[in-house]
Structure formats: structure tokens, C-alpha cells
Image (spheres, rainbow, N blue to C red):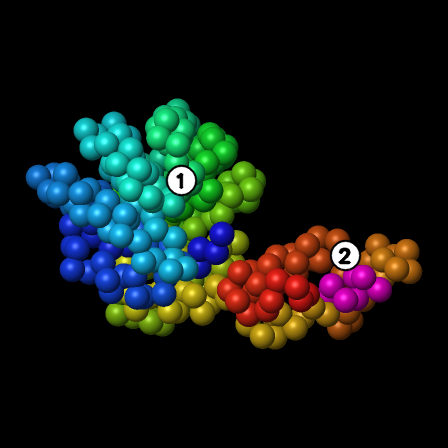
Amino acid sequence: MLRRSLLFVPGIATQRFAKAKAAGADAILFDLEDSVPPDAKGRAREGVCVALSEGGFESSEAAVRVNAPGTPFHEDDVRATALAGAAAIMVPKSERPDDLRAVAAILDDVGAGTRILALLETPLGVARALEVGMATPRVDALCFGHADFALEMGVSADDPSKGVLYHARCAVAVAARGCGVQPVDNVCLAVRDEEALRHDIHVGMQLGYEGKLCIHPSQVTIANEMYTPAPDEVDYARRVLSGWQAARAEGLGVFTLDDKMVDAPLVRAQERVLERARRAGLISEHTS
């Protein structure tokens, strides 16, 4: 599943749904949590369910951020949106494996193939990231929510490339890789600062993240661009795989390319580059 960009849209703002669908995001995240006041939760859920039922998402994954476990809205959100056709459900405040298993049980009960995106945004959630990621096979990604995490830690959320925010960001990425699920990076709060967004995405890429939570349609294009392999990266990956095939034919386990040693781990990394390029439509399924 390609998730370079995951665009939040308030579940109560039905007038924004069409623009969100047209933004080109790999996933559209209808939000029933933070952006919806308590007295509008039911109305927002109904509107999102209508949008899910209507479809028209083309290549975008239709996902919903439900209200957190333990709230009076949580179970109804999960059940209703899954029945309406949500491809994925983001569970905020993910910190207890039992909560994720409870969500999976509801999805099993309604017969939905819905995936779970676990949003880690509390100190306990980050500390238990590995457990959360392995709670159920339905967990498909670990996402880092740095703003709420910063609030609970008593620090500023302005710069997630420093201090304890950076430490947590690293921990979530490592746990996701350890669980074999996708790591999805935190939002960039500087909505109108392209340079800040590009810097933030670059930091996330260096940590192993595969995609970015977005809070404005303008961020989607940049996230898609930066998380799509560049032509020179695809070319290098192809050269690595070609050299590897030649080396294996000669009975060798390593070879040299551009004066650098290439072994099996680097080959696997370049295979992932080509797989991302295929998912992004840059190369066909039958080429390498």
C-alpha cells in the first residue's frame, strides 16, 4: 500500500470533501476526532459515512480517524465507518494493544476488510510502540502524532527534529520496521512554509518513514514528490540489481559498483526502491 501522503479533512466540513478527493493524496483521512466538537460528533459521522458510501476516491485510500478508545463515540465510529466502506481506520491515542484488538474484533464482527492505522501520540503509546504494532494483523501502519505527544511531555511542538520529539519520532519508525508495518511521519504545522515542510519530510525520510500526515492539500504534492523515488534513484537501483544478478551467476555474495561494495542488505534496500517506484506508477509491474 502506497501511503506517501495522508490528508486530514474535518469530518464535519462536508464542503471540503470534494477538494480533499481531488488533492491527489494516497489516503484521505476523514477526521471525527479533534476537528469535530462533541455536540457534532453524530452529525459528522453520518456525513462521513455518506461520503464513504458514495465512493469516487479513485486511487486514494478512504480512511477515517475515529474518536479514541474509551470515549463514548469510539465503538459507534468504528462500526459505522467500516460498514460504510472505510478502507482503513486510524485509531488515535493508540497505547494499549487490547484497544487495537477490540477494534479488530468489531471489524471482524461486521465482516470488513478494514485496516488499522495506529496513531501513537502519547508517551505511553510511544513506549509501547512495538506492542501496539503487533497487537493484531490488521495494524498496517504506525503513525506518529507529535503535537499531542509534545503536550503530554510539556514541551513545544514547533520543532520535531530536536529533543524528546526527535527521540520519539525515531522510536516509532524503528518499532514500525520491527513490526513489519509502515511508518508514517507526523504533520508539519507550518502550513504555508514550503521550505519547512521539505525540511521536515527530509528528516523523516532519513529516519525511515514512508509517508507524511498532511493537514492541507498544498502539502500533498510535496509529500508525494519527495516520497517518490527520483529517476536517478531508480536507475541506481536497477544497476544494483543487474550487478547482483551477475555476481550471483558467478557464485559471488558481494560485488563492487561505483567503487563501493554491494551486499545482500543493500540489494534488498534497492528492491524496495523499485517497489515504491512501481506503486507510484513510474515503472511497470514487469520491469526491474
Residue 146 or residue 143, whichever sits in front: 143
The secondary element bearing badge 1 is classed as loop
Instruction: Residue 123: tell me if it is visible.
Output: no
Left or right of 30 in this view: 6: right
Q: Which residue is mark 2?
A: 263
Where does the image place residue 246, in percent across and percent down from the top left?
84, 64
Q: Is residue 138 above or below residue 169?
A: above
Quadrant location of the C terminus in the rendered image: bottom right
Q: Look at 71% across and 58% down and name the residue there.
A: 267
Farthest left residue? Answer: 39
Report crowding for label 1: few under 14, some 14 to 19, many 20 or more residues within 10 A (C-alpha).
many
* Residue in front for this viewpoint, 128 or 1: 1
Sequence-first disc among 2 and 1:
1
What span is colored magenta in the figure? 240-246
What's the magenta bit mostly, secondary-structure-wise? helix
Q: Position of residue 215 (x, y in %)?
A: 28, 58
Please tell me in which quadrant of the rendered image residue 18 appears. Answer: bottom left
Q: Position of residue 244 (x, y in %)?
A: 79, 61
Residue 48 covered by magenta stretch: no
User: Does 109 appear above or below 261?
Assistant: above
Vertical arrangement, residue 104 with respect to residue 29, above or below? above
Which one is nearer the viewer's eye here, 77 or 127? Answer: 77
- Image coordinates of residue 271 in percent, x first then y, are 66, 58
Where on the picture, by quarter, is residue 77? top left
Is residue 245 shown in magenta?
A: yes
* Residue type pointed to by label 1: Thr
Q: Which mark is residue 35?
A: none
Q: Mark 1 = which residue?
A: 114
Residue in the picture at 38% in, 44% down: 88
Q: CA distance from mark 2 to mark 1?
A: 38 Å
Residue occupying the far right of the picture: 250
Residue 195 visible in the displayed image? yes
